[in-house]
Image (tube, rainbow, N blue to C red):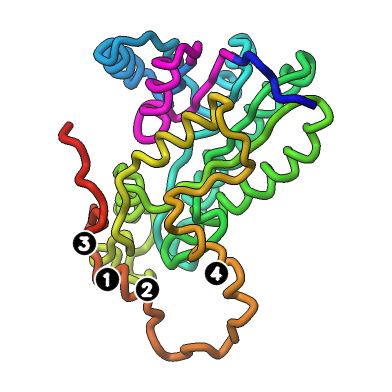
Amino acid sequence: MARPAELKKVLITGAGTGFGLEVALRLAEKGFDVVAAVEIYGQVQTLKRQASERGVTLQVEKLDVTDEGDRRKALDWGVEILVNNAGVGEGGSTVDIPAENIRHQFEVNVTGPLLLTQGIAKQMVARGEGRIIWVSSREGLNVNPFTGLYSASKHAVEAIAESMKDELQEFGIEVATMNPGPFLTGFNDRIFQTWESWNDNPATRLFDYSKLAFPRAQFNPEPVYATLTALAAGEIDSYRNLEPASMLDETKQLIDAPWQKRTTDGLGERNRNVQMAFDMEPEQLRDDQDPLPSP
C-alpha cells in the first residue's frame, strides 16, 4: 500500500520543552495543523507566546499522558499523525532507585503513551491511514550505568513500536521510531538530579550522586529537530532513525557486545563507564560540534 498522501493533523506530546517544542513549531511552519500537548496548564500560555514569536499558531492543550481524562480528550482532536514524545528520565543505580520512581518512569514513558496510542490508533484504522512515531532513544538500543531504568523504559518502547508496526501495516498505518543519542537539551543533565527528591534512606545508597554527572559530552540537537520534523511530515520513511548518524556504527557494535561479555569481567574493579560519570562535568558540548545558539 502506498503511504498516505495528505495527513495534516499532528499531535505532539511533551511539546513544552526540548525536541517536542522545536518540532511542533517547525511542523506548524511547514503548514501542518499542530496540537502541541504539554504536561501542565502552566506551560500553555508560555508555549502560545513562543509560537507567536515564531509567527505560527499552535493548538496548545494540557495532556498528561498518565491522566485518563486527558487521554480521553485527545480522541476528539482528529489526530492523523501522533508523535509520542513525552517522557521523563530517572537517573541512578538500578539498585538504588526507589519504588515510586521506578513506577513513575514506566507510567510516563511506557504505559501512558501506549494507552493514548491505543485509542488514536483505532481511529486511524477506521480512516485507513495514519502515522505513529515513537520517540525512543539510543538508550532503547544500548545501556549505560546510572541510566538503566530510563533505558529499560525505552527498550520497552522499542518492543511496543516494532510489534505495532507489524500489527498495523495491513490497516495502512505507518509506525516509526526516533532514536536520539546524547543531545544537549537539558534532559540528560536533569536525569542526574532526580536523586535530590528521592524518598529513601541516603545511607543505603551505593553511590554519592552529588558527585556524578551525565557521563558523555553531548551534541547540538539540530539533527534531531530536522529528522523528527521530516519523519512526522512523511518526508522520510525509514522505520528506525538514529541521530547523530556518527554514532550508528558504535551503536550497532554495542548491541552485539553482550554476546562477548562474561560474568567475571572486571570483578572488583570500577567499570570505566561508571568512572566517566564521576569525571564528567554537567552540560558538556562535544568539542567537534557547533556551539548552541544563544537563547
Please indicate, yes or no, whether residue 156 appears anywhere in the rendered image.
yes
Disc assigned to residue 253: 4
Q: Which residue is mark 2?
A: 274
Counting residues from the N terminus, which is met first, the one under dot 2 or under dot 4?
4
The residues tagged by marks 1 and 3 sit, at their Cα atoms, a distance apart of 8 Å
Report if the CB atoms under discs 2 and 1 are less than 8 Å apart: yes
Eyeballing the image, is 272 above or below 291?
below
User: Which mark lies nearer to you, 4 or 1?
Assistant: 4
In the displayed structure image, the side of residue 288 where residue 135 appears, left or right: right
Disc assigned to residue 281: 3
In the displayed structure image, the side of residue 39 where residue 258 appears, left or right: right
Report if the CB atoms under discs 4 and 3 are less than 8 Å apart: no
Image coords of residue 235 (percent x, y) = 55, 28
Indicate the amino acid at tag 4.
Gln
Indicate the amino acid at tag 1.
Phe
**Image: magenta residue range:** 8-34
Disc assigned to residue 278: 1
Indicate the amino acid at tag 2.
Val
